[in-house]
Image (cartoon, rainbow, N blue to C red):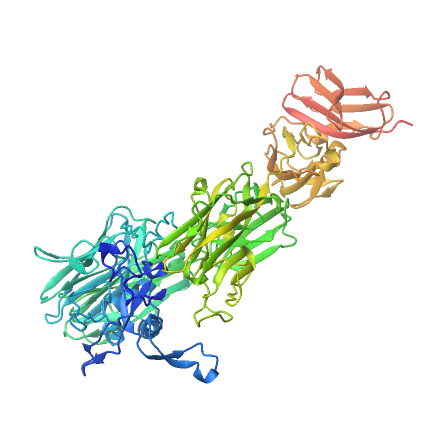
């Protein structure tokens, strides 16, 4: 979870020239201070604490920036001590580098340290760490409201101190008491579903129930910031994507969560903007139902959320220090639980959502005193590989408590779990030299071996890595080169099987000739008032090419460079993608007029992913120069269409300092398509039984205009499943090559030893001398051979080699259909054709060849669907 300071503009009521509600005491949060899933920390004084640990007195620091966000989210979220804390400093003398400092940059790490201790305590207690949403929700749920402690008028959350002062003691106690007087759980809400739980109030404390979730990313607006924090526009469009709702009900009474209704007002009702909601019931007594639902359709199909309840009462509780297990299916999974009770009743235990095929047992299945019990799952060989959430339910007749344990089942046999690849697609053409390999999740895998090679045999590897993600970043690929990639799933039980091999070819890269310079500086001025924006467009026209890489150069005159943020935005035709280049990024400097980083002037800079780290040279002008790396990678633009209007956007949320953009250009590397591709005439082939067949150019022929047959190179990517491919009588395997000239001169053959009809195929890639590539071409047998084929032992051809005649004899003929004989040269042209009537069960004929030039020929003998082919060598003396 990100923890950010709120900022120190609390005393500057002129910092926002257009505040929400026209109230200049509020709406001072900028940039990441408005992010919805982070924890934004305000500053308060050192608190006075009562002997029982309750808050006696605290004051919000006057310098602490006030919220809320433009959509009235409760920001800042929480308050921490940020006044006069001992901290590191920037003094030139080492002895003075520790000093007492005040600011939200003090309160934020103060709160962050407390959060880390809470994570440690939760792990010590429960055997695992909390999710970010749980940790955030716990901090907000247990914070002390600062109402009436610093002359505030609001009870509940507000836009100055959030939910109140961080109370690490109360948060730790909430963890320790989980199951008795508190409840912490991590749940999932599916689309169109609801979640509910019945609880019993302790009758003395307020009943508080809250939900917290890490929401999906929102939409970026044209100014380059998520729709809040843009002071100029006060956009009240909710940043919330998945809107969850919590309610507490008892009989006809429904209790709703807190929400802001203005910069200085709140109420309880339907909260449609915050990814944290809390419902408070004061004077609670009896049984209540807590329900969680959602509005609309959940993006992603489901939303994880965390539920925290305090002020309840339970007679018993149970927990396990190991709630998640991953098991090989040959073993059993056992979860050990500790059980505690206060009510003196008997608690019966049961399981819900046991995986299909598993045998589950609870030993013992009931308890009436403090003790332990085990949950065991066996027969896991019959359970599909997956992750299962099983509910362990305890009921004593008065209370029901449910704990969810996670069981992941893995198998040593990967056969039922083949690995599939996603992108780039098999045979992808003209890819960039940097790309991402993506594959599907394998439920039986814990990690994946990714291999990349320039040969489909993977005899040598270009890249190899074992990862747990479902993607792998490739860079530095060579232009016009074909790459092959595959993925092998693995788990702790065994090594899996390789996926199908996919291939792609990097395009022809054109760099250095595609510089586009801006000429329209109409909106290039950066004003001196807070919340101003400037922009400069440039039109790119490449004729429809795609992007290999982007660099951008510009000059900006601006005093105090750290005031501004700079974004490069792509054309609207590709969705206006944005890359943040600079955002008050000077954290250190080499000097300057003040001790503040980034107090220098002007930019004369090139931003490139290959650039160096940022150096802020404040005494120099320009303060920021040379080629530097951006905050966000420019690779976001890779493989997108280049054409359209690109825009350099500058935002300045601060007063006084201004300037202008004076130069702006974009330098593109683009991907030229490789256009001189091979053509393949593919007629397939008919292979006789138990014989060797010599391929003809009439079977398959690769050609490229202006190139020879020897320049058309086949690479075998899949071998036949029945027969064997040979080149000059030497068998070939995946990765071996042959040329069209090899086919034309009779060097490529297919051998089989089958005695009955069969089908077969093999697959090749074809590449020519211009690096044109035709991938994944399947050469197939045209049809299944019938049972009337010639038996090779009943066909005789002699002499071979010959110089005058060739004799043929066929025995045991069962058909009266004419026999045809065709003599071909190796280019597939027919030299002579003959047809013979059948009057008996044998045929003997002599074919004159004395008029034929020396060379290798193919003699084909056919009767109906039966066919026999033999290579003939003619050698005239």
Q: Quadrant of residue 51?
A: bottom left
Estimate the x, y position of residue 562 in percent, counting from the top left: 43, 62
Estimate the x, y position of residue 577 in percent, counting from the top left: 44, 47
Please state if 726 lies on the left or on the right of 432 as rendered: right
The residue sitting at the bottom extreme is 95
Nearer the observer, 320 or 467: 467
The residue sitting at the right extreme is 877
Q: Is residue 225 visible?
A: no
The residue at 34%/71% (across/down) is 112
Residue 247 vertical placement versus 835 (above, below): below
Please state if 321 lies on the left or on the right of 454 as rendered: left
Nearer the observer, 114 or 86: 86
Total residue callouts:
0
Nearer the observer, 605 or 717: 605
Q: Quadrant of residue 229?
A: bottom left
Estimate the x, y position of residue 173 in percent, counting from the top left: 24, 75
Residue 525 vertical placement versus 585 (above, below): above
Please state if 584 lies on the left or on the right of 159 as rendered: right
The quadrant of the image that shows the C terminus is top right
Please state if 755 lies on the left or on the right of 219 as rendered: right
Q: Is residue 516 visible?
A: yes
Estimate the x, y position of residue 649 in percent, counting from the top left: 43, 50
The residue at 77%/33% (across/down) is 745
């Amino acid at each position: 979870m990100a923890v950010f300071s709120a900022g120190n503009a609390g005393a500057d009521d002129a910092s926002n020239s257009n505040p929400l509600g026209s109230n200049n005491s509020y709406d001072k949060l900028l940039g990441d201070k408005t992010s919805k899933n982070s924890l934004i920390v305000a500053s308060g004084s050192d608190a006075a604490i009562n002997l029982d640990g309750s808050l006696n007195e605290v004051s919000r620091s006057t310098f602490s920036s006030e919220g809320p966000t433009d959509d009235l989210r409760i920001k800042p979220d929480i308050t921490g001590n940020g006044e006069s804390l001992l901290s590191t400093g920037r003094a030139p003398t080492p002895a003075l580098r520790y000093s007492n400092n005040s600011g939200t940059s003090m309160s934020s790490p103060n709160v962050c340290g407390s959060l880390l201790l809470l994570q440690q305590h939760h792990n010590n207690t429960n055997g695992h760490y909390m999710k970010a949403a749980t940790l955030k929700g716990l901090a907000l749920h247990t914070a002390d409201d600062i109402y009436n402690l610093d002359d505030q008028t609001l009870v509940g959350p507000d836009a100055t101190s959030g939910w109140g002062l961080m109370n690490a003691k109360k948060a730790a106690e909430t963890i320790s008491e989980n199951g008795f007087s508190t409840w912490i759980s991590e749940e999932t809400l599916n689309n169109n579903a609801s979640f509910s739980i019945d609880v019993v109030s302790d009758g003395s404390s307020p009943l508080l129930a809250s939900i917290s979730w890490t929401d999906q990313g929102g939409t970026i607006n044209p100014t380059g910031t998520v729709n809040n924090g843009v002071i100029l526009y006060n956009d009240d469009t909710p940043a919330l994507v998945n809107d969850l709702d919590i309610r507490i009900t008892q009989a006809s009474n429904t209790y709703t969560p807190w929400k802001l209704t203005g910069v200085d007002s709140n109420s309880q009702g339907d909260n449609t903007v915050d990814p944290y909601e809390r419902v408070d019931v004061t004077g609670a007594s009896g049984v209540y139902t807590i329900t969680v639902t959602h509005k609309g359709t959940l993006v992603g199909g489901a939303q994880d959320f965390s539920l925290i309840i305090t002020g309840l009462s339970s007679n018993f509780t149970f927990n396990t220090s190991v709630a998640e297990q991953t098991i090989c299916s040959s073993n059993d999974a056992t979860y050990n639980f500790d059980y505690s009770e206060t009510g003196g009743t008997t608690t019966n235990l049961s399981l819900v959502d046991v995986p299909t095929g598993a045998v589950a047992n609870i030993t013992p299945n009931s308890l009436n005193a403090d003790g332990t019990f085990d949950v065991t799952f066996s027969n896991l060989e019959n359970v599909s590989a997956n992750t299962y959430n099983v509910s362990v339910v305890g009921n004593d007749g008065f209370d029901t408590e449910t704990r969810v344990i996670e069981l992941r089942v893995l198998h040593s046999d990967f056969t039922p779990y083949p690995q599939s690849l996603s992108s780039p697609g098999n045979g992808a053409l003209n890819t960039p030299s940097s790309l991402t390999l993506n594959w599907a999740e394998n439920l039986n895998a814990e990690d994946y071996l990714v291999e990349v090679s320039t040969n489909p045999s993977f005899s040598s590897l270009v890249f190899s890595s074992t990862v747990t993600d479902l993607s792998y970043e490739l860079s530095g690929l060579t232009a016009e080169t074909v790459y092959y990639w595959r993925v092998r799933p693995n788990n702790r039980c065994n090594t899996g099987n390789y996926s199908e091999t996919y291939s792609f070819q990097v395009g022809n890269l054109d760099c250095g000739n595609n510089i586009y310079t801006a000429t329209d500086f109409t909106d290039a001025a950066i004003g001196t008032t807070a919340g101003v924006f400037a922009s400069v467009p440039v039109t790119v026209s490449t004729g429809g090419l795609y992007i290999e890489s982007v660099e951008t150069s510009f000059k900006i005159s601006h005093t105090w460079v750290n005031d501004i943020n700079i974004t490069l935005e792509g054309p609207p035709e590709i969705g206006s993608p944005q890359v943040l280049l600079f955002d008050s990024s000077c954290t250190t400097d080499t000097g300057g007029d003040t001790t503040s980083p980034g107090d220098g002037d002007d930019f004369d800079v090139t931003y490139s992913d290959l650039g160096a780290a940022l150096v802020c040279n404040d005494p120099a002008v320009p303060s920021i120069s040379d080629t530097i790396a951006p905050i966000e990678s420019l690779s976001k633009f890779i493989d997108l269409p280049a054409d359209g209007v690109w825009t350099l956007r500058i935002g300045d949320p601060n007063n006084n300092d201004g300037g202008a953009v004076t130069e702006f250009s974009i330098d593109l590397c683009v991907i030229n398509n490789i256009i001189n591709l091979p053509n393949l005439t593919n007629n397939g082939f008919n292979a006789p039984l138990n014989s060797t067949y010599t391929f003809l150019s009439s079977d398959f022929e690769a050609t490229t205009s202006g190139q020879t047959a020897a320049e058309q190179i086949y690479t075998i990517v899949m071998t036949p499943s029945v027969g064997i491919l040979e080149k000059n009588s030497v068998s070939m395997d995946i990765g071996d090559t042959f040329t069209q000239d090899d086919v034309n001169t009779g060097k490529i053959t297919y051998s089989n030893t089958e005695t009955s009809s069969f089908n077969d195929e093999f697959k090749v890639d074809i590449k020519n001398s211009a690096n044109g590539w035709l991938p994944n071409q399947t050469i197939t047998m045209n049809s299944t051979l019938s049972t009337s084929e010639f038996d090779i032992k009943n066909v005789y051809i002699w002499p071979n080699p010959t110089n005058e005649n060739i004799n043929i004899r066929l025995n045991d003929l069962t058909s009266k259909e004419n026999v045809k004989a065709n003599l071909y040269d190796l280019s597939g042209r027919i030299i002579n054709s003959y047809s013979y009537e059948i009057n008996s069960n044998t045929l003997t004929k002599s074919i004159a060849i004395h008029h034929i030039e020396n060379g290798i020929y193919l003699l084909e003998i056919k009767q109906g669907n039966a066919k026999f082919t033999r290579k003939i060598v003619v050698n005239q003396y």
